[in-house]
Image: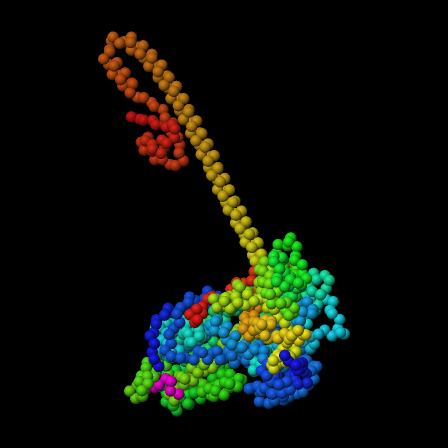
Amino acid sequence: MDRRDYVPCHMDTLRQSPSPCSSRPSSPRTPPFEMFGPVGIEAVLDQLKIKAMKTGFEFNIMVVGQSGLGKSTMVNTLFKSKVWKSAMPSLEVPTPQTLELHSVSHVIEEKGLKLKLTVTDTPGFGDQINNDKCWDPVLGYINQQYEQYLQEELLITRQRHIPDTRVHCCVYFVPPTGHWLWAGSPPHSDTAAPPPPPALSCPDSLRPLDIEFLRRLCRTVNVVPVIARADSLTIEEREAFRSRIQQNLKTHCIEVYPQKCFDEDINDSILNGKIREQIPFAVVGADQEHLVNGRCVLGRKTKWGIIEVENIAHCEFLLLRDLLIRSHLQDLKDITHNVHYENYRVIRLNESHQLPRGPGWVNLAPASPVQLTSPGCLKVRRRAQKDSKDDEC
Amino acid sequence: MASSDETRLLVSPSHCSSYAAAAGTAFGDPRPSCSHGAPLTSPHSFHMMSKTACISPQVSDCDTQTKKENIRSLTMCGHVGFESLPDQLVDRSIQQGFCFNILCVGETGIGKSTLINTLFNTSFEEHESSHFCPNVRLKAQTYELQESNVRLKLTVVYTVGFGDQINKEESYQPIVDYIDGQFDAYLQEELKIKRSLFSYHDSRIHVCLYFIAPTGHSLRTLDLLTMKSLDSKVNIIPLIAKADTISKTELQKFKVKLMSELVCNGVQIYQFPTDDETTAKINASMNGHLPFAVVGSMDEIKVGNKMVRARQYPWGIVQVENENHCDFVKLREMLICTNMEDLREQTHARHYELYRRCKLEEMGFNDMSPENKPISLQETYEAKRHEFYGERQRKEEEMKQMFVQRVKEKEAILKEAERELQAKFEHLKRAHQEERMRLEEKRRILEEETVAFAKKKATSEIFQSQSFMASSATVRKEKDRKKEPGYRLELLCFDVRACETNDGRYDADASREGYNTRGQHE
């Protein structure tokens, strides 16, 4: 055991006499104490892992988009299983006349790890003639989950582990219209799509329905937009379409996930910046396997070739999967819990003061979903202030 | 170009092995990843979970009934990749840092700070406390420790002056208050409308190390009482301090005695959890070694050819990390390496929830209203808030009334004073007038006299001139004398203040007014 030089550090005496303190600013960053040898604090990471494996994880995802864009297929492809019994609407079931929400829960397991997955679908979105306020049921559902969680949290005797049904991520499917910019046309311009009239100063690739919906949704939930059925766009068209969508999002101040304001530090900014360049991902969903070059791949078979879903040259499905599952799942849950849920809670607790007082007022009426999407700005800081993550890297 | 285009639906229902309930026994049957060249018709291989001992494949229909929560387990064909989830969780925790709070209860000089130093292998600066504290205080200090990439914010709270007083009745109350205070602070933060729980420095005590003096006999009354009052609020781990003063056989008997006393008196000490297979065995065996007999030392002594932490006596060397000598290694193992997370969880899920429930019920909140309808915290809170506002309104009104009344009273008094002043002024004015009239009178008389005198003078001068020849010398003298007395008329203005009149001479004050009367008498 070698003795390192003991560096006397500034001791952080927070209190000298017993007195309860309400939340204090975090202590000034002091250099850590030097320990003379290993103590075993690292083992806490293993303890965390064991605990996590035992309790399992939960993940709730919502897919929104017009019918026929391949939402159900995409979900099936993402989780490599038959989440929906049949992706194709059967002939007996008529297309829904109003927007309904279908939720399905599954427990999937991989390498001893259990994940309770809940997928909410929105058949009938944007399918009606008059799609006014079609976002209300969706927002209502999301707020209802928040409300449920809030009520559970406010109980006197509450459960050890409150079941989390809040929507962690909403995947929004943008139809691949691929409208051109009016300034300059692509090389292969033999397809239709006449250039938009010059009166439009900023041609929108997102339709008004998309914009309205995204604007409202981004304030309450993490939204990941994707270009659906991307196999109908060539690579150049795809890139042009993507950049226009990004411009549109910026013009309308729609912050999709990963939000810039939640970047903790340099590493996060770099990583998320790369992702932000690629948003929205152009995806193709497929749940059938084909044989390509002796390998068995997931893909769509057409007369002119097989589109491999997991081939990065063909489509960006892998990026979506990695974002949602492999790298940012915990982050999605964190932001939902620390930011969106807290915002909802603040609004909800504040507005209950405005209820009229009378003999029968004790029963709080549930707030209508529209009121709750007030244009508050997202909380900027979601975690404790900057640490020596720089020191670590 | 693939000619044999065999397509096949993934997850055909008949190959599912089980559709079981969500929470417990589902195990998956992920096929080998098809993209790795496995032939299409390969037999499925079972993937056994490391934990479940029994496999019970139930071939059931795909449309099997769902459980009441509509949850089914799904089998996947292929690697989705969410086994990185624990790593994501760990990464986030590393970024946030960990926080651990230890409370050390024991009498002065029993070795609390030395043990903490030894446990964490550093030298936290500590001053030895005196024995003469009038009451028990708690001293808290926070340190930041870092081991590889794990940052730990350690808070150690010592009891200062515990067991030193002559009258020890109030000894344990400060400790209980402190623990409750930390819970309360957390509760306050949680109940706020705009809260920031993720960046809140959690100061709730996660574990209490209770140092028992190595008497070898039994538990002291003070110890028993303190532990009894703390056992529902914090995880207690009892330790036998300075264990190098007890021999092995005595130690065994002492431990047995202590544990039986604790059990008899219903003191609930912390039991290491035995529900997880990886740690069940070791935890169970450690539970049998409680209370740990510990020795702390930061001195390094050469034993053999190594430097170890030990205490050197003339009769031998007590090595801290030698399992035969004391249970220090067990303590460190249990406290830090195996159960730190569980201690934190117990604190949050059990002790804090209990405190919260009691506190809220005390404040009058209930989950069920008297008619047995469920009401929420929010509704009760609103009711209370309404009440509170009503109360406040009433009090404001009261205060306003009181204020108005007081103002009125004051006004009345002032008016009264004014009136009095006015009356006085009138009176003085009248007196002044009278005085003035009198003086006018006097003046008139004086003037008449002057006129009379002048007349007299004139007539006497005529007589004088007639008899001037006769006696001019004597007349001159009389004239001189008669010219002397000159009456100068000055009106004295009466001042309210009493002026001292001294021989007809008046103050300078009295002569302040415009006209004075001064009569000079010779």
Q: Residue at x 71, y 74 (%)?
A: A88
Location of the N terminus of chain A (image quadrant): bottom left
Spot the residue most to the bottom. Answer: B249
**In the rendered view, does B374 fall on the left or right side of B130?**
right
Does any portion of residue A109 appear in the rendered image? no
- Which residues fall within the magenta stretch? B317-323
Depicted A228 relative to depicted B269: above or below: above
**Quarter-of-image position of residue B1:** bottom right
Quadrant showing the C terminus of chain A: bottom left
**Residue B499 locus on image (x, y percent):** 36, 35
Above or below A360: residue A287: below
Query: Left or right of B5: which side holds B216?
Result: left
Q: Quadrant of residue B361?
A: bottom right
User: What residue is shown at x 36% (from left), y 26% (from top)?
Assistant: B490
Q: Is residue A393 left or right of residue A335?
A: left
Q: Nearer the viewer, residue B279 or A245?
A: A245
Instruction: State the image coordinates of residue B78 (x, y, percent, origin top left).
Output: 60, 80
One can see residue A91 in this view: yes
Query: Residue A386 or A352: which is nearer the viewer?
Result: A386
Q: How many marks?
A: 0
On the picture, is B285 further left or further right than A34? right
Residue B428 on image: x %, y %: 44, 34
In this view, the residue farthest toward the left is: B473
Name the spot of residue B271 as percent of width and height, x first: 49, 83
Q: Which residue is farthest right?
A: A92
Q: Give yes or no for residue A101 being in the magenta stretch.
A: no
Q: Residue at (55%, 52%) from the top-left corner?
A: B400
Please name whichever residue, B237 or B330, is drawn nearer the observer in this view of the structure: B330
Residue at 46%, 65% in the rendered image? A25
Relative to residue A268, is residue B342 depicted above or below? below
